[in-house]
Amino acid sequence: MDLAYTEEEQSFAARLREWLAVVLPKLPPKPSPDDWPGRRAYDAGWQRALYDAGYADLHWDAPPTKRLIFLEETERAGAPYVGANFVGLLHAGPTIAAEGTAGQRERWLPPILRGDEIWCQGFSEPDAGSDLASLRTRAVRDGDFYVVTGSKIWTSHAEVADWCELLVRTDPGAPKHRGISWLAMPMDTPGVTVRPLRTLAGSTEFAEVFLDEVRVPVANRVGAENDGWRVTMVTLSFERGTAFVGEVVACRRTLGELARTARENGRWDDPELRRRLGRLNAEFGALWRLIQWNVSESARTGGVPGTGGSVFKLRYSHARQDLYDTAADVLGPDALDLSRQWSLDRLSSLSYTIAAGTSQIQRNIVAERLLGLPKGH
């Protein structure tokens, strides 16, 4: 398989680099990490700039390879991360584009692309964890509405979100994978309570969400009733297949910075450290090739990433942890200074083997769906 970019794709990358070189120096300062209204405004402003320049639709209304180039170039240039737009641009938006009706796509996709509306993810529950299909938040049909009662946890960006991609149980009597529906819930609906959660790194990008007889229009259901598990697999394939592309580029850049720092502070003299840096360089290079393969495969199969995303997610989670463990060795005692970005990144890396499906779940997917091994009992 030829993983090289075509002449047209290279031309697109060059135009994008020129635009980034002009617009990035003009951006305002980033707000404080604790200023979520400010962070929302900053992230939405960047998304609007992309929209006005004609780059906003690359998340789902473009060939996967072009999307890959966009993520690669923006990360290399140090452009703002999607931030509060993460769920809308990389999870909910692609899912609606793939599974929504024409009316749903018209209603929800343009505001996401313009940065007008922010989404959060309401999947995990306190007693479901990695066994997502065990969720118990119930939605009872009442005419043209579902009445939703339950709770969610680790709900990304809930405190500033306008909408929530919400998994609910619409048939409690069905087998656990077959009684689920995927809803778009307005966060300002009566009965929704948000309680921010503080992470190990001190940030509050997650929250608990409590739902007390929240009325969600049936028209906000994406996919058929009780077909939400299949729709969820589409969401998770995007989350595991393409949502981390920019982070791989960032890790490769961090790796280069680690090598330079090691040369400056004398740690480069340690042959074991040099071997670790060399191995990480090879590993992230291989992960980048795997991304290119997954993107090529999704282009062949209609734009939705396949189970190869689980292979990537599994290895990337551990590679990222290895990277920032190595960063701690390069920094030495300075690794305890939480004002340093690498120290904060090391703390956040601990969650990567849990977030977006634990490593154990990814191994099951690889074993059963790729290798054809029997399911465990």
Image (cartoon, rainbow, N blue to C red):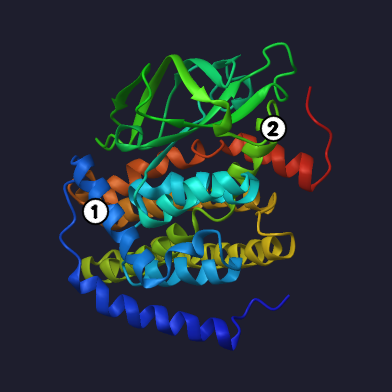
Q: Badge 2: few (under 14), some or many (20 or more) residues near its Cα, within 10 Å?
A: few
Q: Which residue is mark 1?
A: 42
Q: At x 29% / y 79%, what residue is drawn? A: 21
The first of marks 1 and 2 along the sequence is 1
Say what amino acid the circle numbered 1 marks.
Tyr
The mark closer to the camera, 1 or 2, is 2
Label ID, residue 224? 2
Answer above or below: position of 132 versus 37.
Answer: above
Looking at the image, which is closer to me, 48 or 247?
A: 48
Say what amino acid the circle numbered 2 marks.
Ala
**Element at badge 2?**
loop
Residue 3 drawn at (x, y percent):
65, 76
Q: Is residue 263 left or right of residue 249?
A: left
Q: At x 61% / y 49%, what residue is drawn? A: 102
Q: At x 30% / y 37%, what residue is drawn? A: 160
Label ID, residue 87? none
Real-space CA distance between mark 1 and mark 2, rounded to the nearest whole angstrom: 36 Å
Answer above or below: position of 119 versus 331.
Answer: above
Answer above or below: position of 266 versus 350.
Answer: below
Residue 367 drawn at (x, y percent):
75, 41
Locate the N terminus and report the quarter of the image it occupies: bottom right
